[in-house]
Image (spheres, helix red, strand yellow):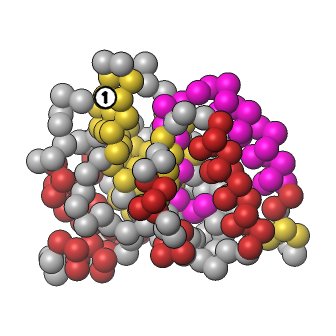
Amino acid sequence: MIKILHTSDWHLGRIIYGRSLLNDQEYFINNFFLPYIKDYKPDAIIIAGDIYDRKIAPSQAIRLFDNTITEICLECNTQLIIISGNHDGADRLTLGSKLLSNMGVHFISRIPETPEPIVINNQNECVNIWPLPYFEPVDMRDYLNNDKLHSFNDSYKSYIKYISDKTPLNQTNILTAHCFVTGSKTSESESPLYIGGSGEVHKDTFSLFDYVALGHLHAPQCIN
């Protein structure tokens, strides 16, 4: 059985009422997250965006994340799939990404030029993980050369249709993305950016996939 650990929205470096949460975040990672990974032994770990709390992350937050993925690479035999969220500095996040991909650490911060899944194999099982980082509708308009795309829902529908011919339906397919799905429950800790309205993506848009590993909202969601 292939095991996948899905997490998102770490917001490393977040400050609440003038107090940095970095010490708390470091404590959680070192005392709960990393020990859990070593015990659970997942075949893949998905971090679905918003690793950092702002586009220019503080150096302490970058060091913490660097130490975390280094520990995962050295101690765990797992693939690490990381997409950028709306809080992340997309270009800063992917420094050294081509080199790291050879070590099983996959950073994706732009719509892939050639869409293809990250394939997870374990004995006779195969899971395809399709990464789609946070984007604005204008980015998808340019990518697909389609001036009719103005909403997030239309953008996602068009992209998924674009990759549907490449998706092997006899295998398990997972999409990881960073967006707000209609019917989701929000919490007080989320940024008001694109919460609802034109920023929503309908759940039926994702019917091609067996599971959708989302980021953006800060609580587990079970829409369908």
Residue 169 in the figure: left or right of residue 153: left
Residue at the image point whose x is 35% and y is 29% from the top: 121
**Towards the viewer: 20 or 16:** 20
Q: Position of residue 28 (x, y in %)?
A: 79, 46
Q: Is residue 57 above or below residue 134?
A: below
Magenta segment, principal secondary structure? helix
Give residue 141's quadrant in the image.
Answer: bottom left
Residue 29 in the figure: left or right of residue 174: right
Q: Is residue 218 visible?
A: no
Q: Amino acid at mark 1?
A: Cys
Question: Does the stretch in magenta take in 159?
Answer: no
Residue at the image point whose x is 45% and y is 59% from the top: 99
Query: The magenta stretch spans which residues?
Result: 24-51
**Towards the viewer: 220 or 173:** 173
Residue position for label 1: 126
Q: Position of residue 131 (x, y in %)?
A: 37, 53
